[in-house]
Image (cartoon, rainbow, N blue to C red):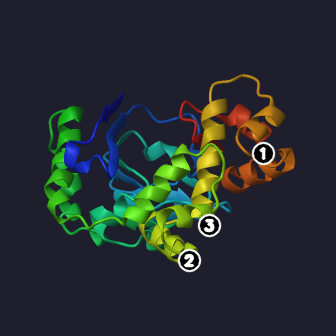
Amino acid sequence: MHLFLPPPPPLAPYVAGFWYWEGPGQAHSLERIMPTGTSTLVINLYEDELRTYTCDGRVQRQGGSILVGAHSAFSIIDTQEQRAVLGVEFRAGGTWPVFGVAGDELCNQHIELRDLWSPGSSLRDRILCAPTPWARLQIMADAFTAKATSFAADHPAVTFALRQLHDAPRLATIEDLSHAAGISARRLARLFSIQVGLTPKLYARVLRFNRVVEYICDRPEVDWCDLALRCGYFDQAHFIRDFKSFCGLTPGEYLPRRTASPHHVLI
């Protein structure tokens, strides 16, 4: 079961949506999750713990409600605990207005919700008491809607830069963005990092990588040279190097390990 609830209007600038997943444990025990440039709040309703792993097999155990900050590299999750999970998918930079915590402090981090928001410590219990999955999603949406009156203001230069990066088919330079936004490159880079968690250049690279992943997600064969040029890479070597830095695999290694979600790969 996979459900999705769009955000109510007060949350739409900051939240992409609320989702619920329920199903049997996967045949494989671990999955690699690739970066998207955004943050996700994950609440494990199957057990009150979430586990992540390092490449050498070390495990980090945390409570069942965590915020996964924007990442610059892949992370590894335990699929056996992913049997009933509820999440909030934030838009790029959305956690800054919602929680008032600088994005660069959350970058590559998994932070327990209770450490970011005091009412969050009881949210999981309230959700578990709901009678249906849709009711669980609604409790989450209502909790964040009630919080909307205290959201911090985002910076218009960052909003502008994000829109430009998403609309541009090729990598925009920080100089181009800052000139168009009317502020210095240094100032834009700092504001962007505070709100989004990544620098503009790194965020643009993640966006480009995601375009590749979404393009190849269900294709049995891929013309890698054509795709590299189509997505704005200098050459195939540049493409492979960038892909591996985010995925930990070459494009050819990624293909047979794909899952139903293009940003998840088998380990």
- Residue at the image point whose x is 50% and y is 67% from the top: 107
At numbered mark 1, what does the secondary structure look like: helix, strand or loop?
A: loop
Q: Which residue is mark 3?
A: 175
Q: Nearer the viewer, residue 77 or 234?
A: 234
Residue 100 lies left or right of residue 36; in this view the side is: left
Query: Where in the figure is residue 115, as x and y percent of width and height?
Result: 30, 72
What amino acid is at disc 3?
A: Glu
Lower sequence index among marks 3 and 2: 3
Above or below, 104 against 39 in this view is below
Lower sequence index among marks 2 and 1: 2
At numbered mark 2, what does the secondary structure look like: helix, strand or loop?
A: helix
Q: Which mark is residue 250?
A: 1
Q: Quadrant of the N terminus?
A: top left
Q: Which residue is mark 2?
A: 186
Q: Nearer the viewer, residue 93 or 144?
A: 93
Whether tag 2 and tag 1 are in contact, CB under 8 A, the answer is no
Query: Where in the figure is residue 156, as x and y percent of width and height?
Result: 37, 63
Whether tag 3 and tag 2 are in contact, CB under 8 A, the answer is no
Above or below, 217 against 118 in this view is above
Q: Callout 1: few (<14), some (14-19), or many (20+) C-alpha neighbours within 10 Å?
A: some
Query: Where in the figure is residue 249, as x and y percent of width and height?
Result: 74, 48
At numbered mark 3, what does the secondary structure look like: helix, strand or loop?
A: helix
Above or below, 67 against 17 in this view is below
What amino acid is at disc 2?
A: Arg
- Residue at the image point whose x is 18% and y is 40% from the top: 138
What amino acid is at disc 1?
A: Thr
